Image (cartoon, rainbow, N blue to C red):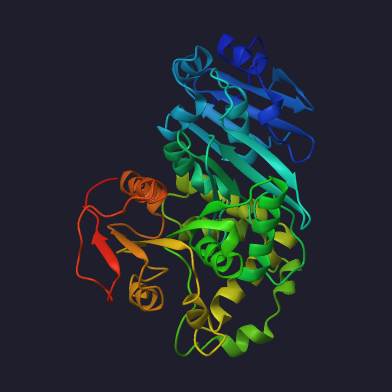
């Protein structure tokens, strides 16, 4: 950490704040404090209120909403327009922690290259409630739905890769991130209604839908319930209904998610547990930023209720039977692409054969990764998504079919 200093801030930070564009920035509380750290030189606070941003000496007794840390050279490159803040962020030369909706939004609002398709943050009023969004690009719309415990920020690599050709819209699901957190069922149908409400409020009649993990299950629900609103479905390591015996089901049915209004464990204990469970969470990495995003919602009562309710629904969903998920999936009409991780410990790749039976026309791509392909194999993931969006096959070669008429391939191994 740089430590607080007294004196004038570097010219690079002054330049950034002077070109702050409030039209692409959203402060959920109406104001925000962003701590800007220059390694080895000190730290200053950018104070945003309404449409104005000011730079002040850092106030050590004030908790910042977001913290951004980089060395002096990186800050100069951003200020001079040699590289945008988001490019340096994705390259790992700049670290954003705490509230990424605010921190990444500040980087987007101070870019030196404004344009119609620039990265922008907002909270959209819909008939269901307020939905927080991250958007970039122009053209055909692609709606992105994140996984359990995640937020829209998990799609930053995907937005960067595809925004040059498409209008990429990542939303915080209800109960997560900066969207409203109502008391509700938090099953796939509930969250799909919020997604449709967002499309309506944005004036979008049809969109391609990309879902990761839990978001993949929501995307499939959109395809089954609202096929007229879906152009195509892209499912990355999607959460799907389990078949067979569920030994914990009787206990979960008795355990109400509303118990999340109580915090049974002290905050330091919860933080320590989560950070030990996720590799890399203790350092200033993407994993650490992801943990910050999770804890930001989980450590609020309504955020906990939403998390417990959504997790409970995922486990308890009926897979078989006339009204079960797998029977309903057979009626999912939109063109579909499934991306699987061969080393995924949360959604085993064995689900692919069940999907192939229900949707024999779906395409399947296997990647040498775990549960988060957009981070673990970004180049291969985004190449497959782009090909699908262009209407081409996502395959460079075919592997043995999982079922008659089903297309599959194994992506080349190696770093993405």
Q: Residue 133: percent from the left, percent from the top?
A: 64, 44
- Viewer-nearest residue: 327 or 173: 327
Question: Could you say which quadrant of the image residue 401 lies in?
Answer: bottom left
Asked whether residue 46 appears in the rendered view, the answer is: yes
Question: Could you say which quadrant of the image residue 26 lies in?
Answer: top right
Residue 211 horizontal side relative to residue 344, left or right: right
Q: Residue 139: percent from the left, percent from the top?
A: 53, 37
Point 40% across, 32% down: residue:
91
Q: How many marks?
A: 0
Residue 353 horizontal side relative to residue 199, left or right: left
Q: Give the vertical position of 270 relative to 347 (above or below).
A: above
Point 56% across, 74% down: residue:
314
Q: Give the vertical position of 274 relative to 401 (above or below).
A: above
Q: Give the vertical position of 415 relative to 356 (above or below).
A: above
Q: Residue 250: percent from the left, percent from the top?
A: 60, 90
- Viewer-nearest residue: 340 or 15: 340
Q: Residue 210: percent from the left, percent from the top?
A: 49, 54
Asked whether residue 265 appears in the rendered view, the answer is: no
Q: Give the vertical position of 281 relative to 63 (above or below).
A: below
Point 80% across, 35% down: residue:
30
Point 75% across, 41% down: residue:
28
- Viewer-nearest residue: 131 or 66: 131
Question: Could you say which quadrant of the image residue 297 lies in?
Answer: bottom right
The C terminus is located in which quarter? top left
């Amino acid at each position: 950490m740089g430590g607080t200093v007294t004196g004038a801030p570097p010219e690079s930070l002054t330049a950034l704040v002077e070109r702050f564009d409030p039209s692409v920035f959203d402060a959920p509380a109406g104001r925000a404090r962003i701590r800007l750290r220059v390694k080895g030189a000190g730290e200053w606070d950018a104070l945003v209120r309404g449409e104005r941003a000011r730079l002040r000496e850092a106030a050590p007794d004030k908790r910042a909403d977001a913290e951004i840390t980089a060395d002096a050279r990186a800050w100069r490159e951003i200020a001079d327009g040699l590289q945008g803040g988001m490019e340096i962020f994705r390259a790992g030369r700049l670290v954003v922690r705490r509230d990424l909706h605010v921190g990444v939004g500040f980087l987007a609002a101070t870019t030196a290259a404004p344009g119609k398709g620039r990265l922008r943050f907002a909270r959209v009023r819909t008939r269901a409630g307020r939905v927080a969004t991250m958007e970039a690009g122009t053209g055909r719309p692609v709606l992105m739905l994140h996984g359990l415990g995640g937020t829209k920020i998990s799609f930053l690599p995907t937005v960067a890769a595809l925004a040059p050709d498409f209008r990429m819209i990542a939303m915080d699901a209800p109960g997560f991130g900066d969207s409203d957190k109502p008391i509700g069922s938090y099953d796939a149908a509930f969250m799909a209604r919020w997604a449709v409400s967002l499309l309506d409020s944005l004036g979008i009649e049809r969109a391609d839908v990309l879902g990761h993990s839990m978001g993949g299950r929501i995307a499939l629900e959109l395809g089954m319930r609202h096929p007229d609103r879906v152009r195509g479905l892209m499912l990355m390591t999607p959460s799907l209904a389990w078949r067979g015996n569920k030994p914990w089901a009787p206990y979960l049915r008795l355990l109400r998610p509303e118990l999340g209004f109580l915090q049974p464990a002290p905050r330091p204990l919860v933080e320590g547990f989560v950070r030990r469970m996720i590799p890399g969470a203790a350092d200033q990495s993407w994993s650490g930023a992801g943990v910050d995003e999770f804890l930001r919602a989980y450590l609020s009562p309504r955020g906990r209720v939403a998390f417990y309710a959504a997790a409970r629904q995922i486990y308890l969903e009926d897979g078989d039977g006339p009204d079960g998920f797998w029977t309903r999936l057979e009626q999912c009409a939109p063109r579909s692409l499934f991306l699987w991780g061969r080393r995924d410990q949360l959604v085993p790749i064995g689900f692919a054969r069940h999907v192939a039976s229900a949707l024999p026309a779906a395409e399947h791509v296997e990647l040498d990764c775990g549960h988060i392909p957009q981070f673990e194999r970004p180049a291969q993931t985004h190449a497959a998504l782009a090909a699908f969006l262009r209407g081409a096959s996502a395959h460079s070669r075919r592997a043995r079919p999982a079922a008659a008429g089903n297309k599959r391939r194994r992506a080349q191994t190696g770093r993405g």
